[in-house]
């Protein structure tokens, strides 16, 4: 694949991400019954080691939601990461103000938000690329960021050190939803997606 072909396909992938982000904003608006606005999502393909230098420190404690993606093959894992304070803010967006936020309720609310976001991106991908994808139920974990990322890498047998990072920001009534959505692909999957976009 030439550099020009790669850039063309990366731009096409960015457009899919934009569509997925818009779908997520619409779905979240319906869930909370008020308008949700979205900043244009940013997309990066980053090496594993860069994550700790540019995104989050390895020893930062985070809440993470994992969703395995499969179809006619195993595609990889979507991983949404937020620090505990932002996770609580996310939960506040979809929880009535009179309800006391327990840890279980926060985790459940964040799982639901991530489920909506991931399925919005999956739907956008499947409309452009002729592949079928289904996801597992969301799984919440709380640990150091480095421990979570390294565990996902080992489970995916990922050795080429690449990760797809989608950064989203959504706003509603002064509340801000901010978080990083990572896609850790199985070996060869990222190349497959880029090739399919070139057809």
Image (cartoon, grey):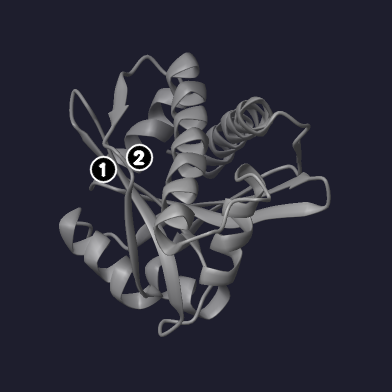
Q: Residue at x 63, y 59 (%)?
A: 89
Query: On residue 34, which mark appears?
Result: none
Residue sticking out furthest to the front: 98
Cα gap from disc 1 to disc 2, whole angstroms: 5 Å
**Residue 56, position in %: x, y?**
52, 75
**Residue 139, position in %: x, y?**
30, 50
**Residue 37, position in %: x, y?**
78, 38
Q: Residue at x 64, y 44 (%)?
A: 96
Q: Residue at x 43, y 19 (%)?
A: 126
Q: Nearer the viewer, residue 7 or 68?
A: 68
Q: Is residue 40 above or below residue 107?
A: above
Q: Residue at x 42, y 38 (%)?
A: 1
Is residue 28 shown left or right of residue 196?
right
Q: Is residue 108 above or below residue 142?
A: above
Is residue 132 shown left or right of residue 50?
left
Query: On residue 191, which mark appears?
Result: 2
Res. 37 in view: yes
SS at badge 2: helix
Query: Residue 15 falls in which quadrant of the image?
Result: top right
Report crowding for label 2: few under 14, some 14 to 19, many 20 or more residues within 10 A (C-alpha). Answer: few
Is residue 185 shown left or right of residue 72?
right
Is residue 193 shown left or right of residue 40?
left
Q: Which residue is the site of mark 1? A: 188
């Amino acid at each position: 694949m030439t550099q020009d072909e790669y850039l063309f396909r990366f731009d096409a992938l960015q457009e899919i991400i934009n569509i997925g982000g818009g779908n997520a904003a619409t779905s979240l608006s319906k869930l909370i019954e008020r308008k949700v606005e979205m900043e244009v999502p940013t997309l990066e393909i980053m090496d594993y080691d860069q994550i700790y230098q540019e995104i989050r420190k390895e020893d930062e404690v985070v809440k993470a939601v994992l969703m395995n993606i499969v179809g006619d093959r195993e595609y990889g894992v979507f991983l949404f990461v937020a620090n505990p304070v932002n996770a609580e803010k996310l939960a506040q967006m979809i929880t009535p103000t009179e309800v006391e936020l327990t840890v279980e309720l926060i985790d459940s609310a964040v799982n639901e938000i991530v489920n909506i976001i991931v399925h919005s991106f999956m739907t956008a991908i499947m409309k452009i690329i002729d592949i079928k994808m289904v996801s597992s139920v969301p799984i919440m974990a709380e640990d150091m960021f480095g421990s979570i990322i390294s565990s996902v890498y080992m489970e995916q047998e990922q050795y080429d050190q690449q990760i797809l990072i989608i950064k989203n920001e959504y706003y509603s009534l002064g509340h801000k939803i901010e978080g990083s959505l990572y896609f850790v692909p199985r070996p060869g999957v990222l190349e497959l997606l880029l090739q399919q976009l070139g057809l």
